[in-house]
Image (spheres, rainbow, N blue to C red):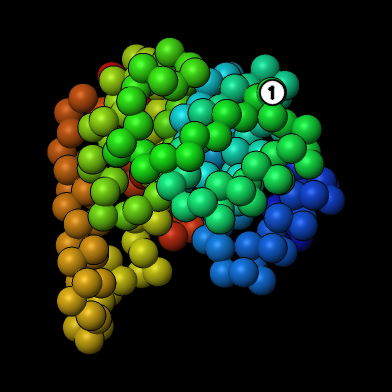
Amino acid sequence: MTYFSALNKYKNNDYIKYMEEYASNHKVPILKEEGLDLLVSIIKMNNVKNILEIGTAIGYSSSVFALINKDIRIDTIERDELMYQEALKNINALGLESQINIIFEDALNVDLSTLKLDQYDLIFIDAAKSQYTNFFTKFEVKLRKGGIIFSDNLLFHGLVENASGKESRNLNQMLRKIRAYNEWLSNNEAYDTTFLRIGDGIAISIKK
């Protein structure tokens, strides 16, 4: 954590610090601090209240979002049982179970009618990189006009731009899908998208 980032108040929560240490020690990918700080700012500036998160992991980012404002409500989806159980533990420990609803399911199999919230101000995509386009097209119908879709990990450790040529077949296939998603976002006229070299590469797409 940098000196400047550490000045943000949510970083002073001891349990959030514990979750950061857990993620580091167990190699659980969580939103990098620059991306998280930006997303927290977006939530505050746009008075975001209803959030859909695709990819809960240990519940780190959804917990940070919920701590911004007690009126914030979050539906978050996780398909890995170990991550789901860890997220449940963490959210309960923080007393955020009334704000955060965790759905244990593959996001592509989720029945939209079962989501607790009818419409979202913000959708945060941070799950299987090869499925980003499918996640976007499945859930965008639940995003209000003027709402935001925030996509993370679009440079994938820099490999999307600067692959060495020695990557495995599976990795190359995933990189091609991320590049295709980036191009698709760039050309999607229903959204105004800005790409930022922050963290591991993010895109902010605003529904027109």
Number of numbered discs overlaid on the protein picture? 1
Identity of the residue drawn at 62% across and 29% down: 100
Relative to 116, residue 182 above or below: below
Q: Which residue is mark 1?
A: 98
Can residue 42 be spotted in the picture? Answer: no
Identity of the residue drawn at 60% across and 38% down: 62
For the N terminus, the quadrant is bottom right
**Label 1's element?**
loop
Q: Residue furthest bottom?
A: 166
Relative to 135, residue 113 above or below: above
Identity of the residue drawn at 21% across and 25% down: 190
Give the image quarter of residue 61.
top right
Identity of the residue drawn at 63% across and 62% down: 23
At which x and y percent is residue 184? 17, 43
Give the image quarter of residue 140.
top left
For the C terminus, the quadrant is top left
Viewer-side residue, 94 vs 50: 94
Q: Is residue 156 left or right of residue 102?
A: left
At which x and y percent is residue 92? 74, 37
Q: Is residue 161 left or right of residue 99?
A: left
Relative to 130, residue 95 above or below: above
Viewer-side residue, 65 vs 198: 65
Viewer-side residue, 30 vs 194: 30
Relative to 60, residue 72 above or below: above
At which x and y percent is residue 137? 23, 32
Q: Is residue 136 left or right of residue 1?
A: left
Q: Alpha-carbon neighbours of circle 1 within 10 Å: few (<14), some, or many (≥20)?
A: few
- The amino acid marked with disc number 1 is Ser
Q: Is residue 148 left or right of residue 6?
A: left
At which x and y percent is residue 85? 61, 48
Can residue 148 be spotted in the picture? Answer: yes
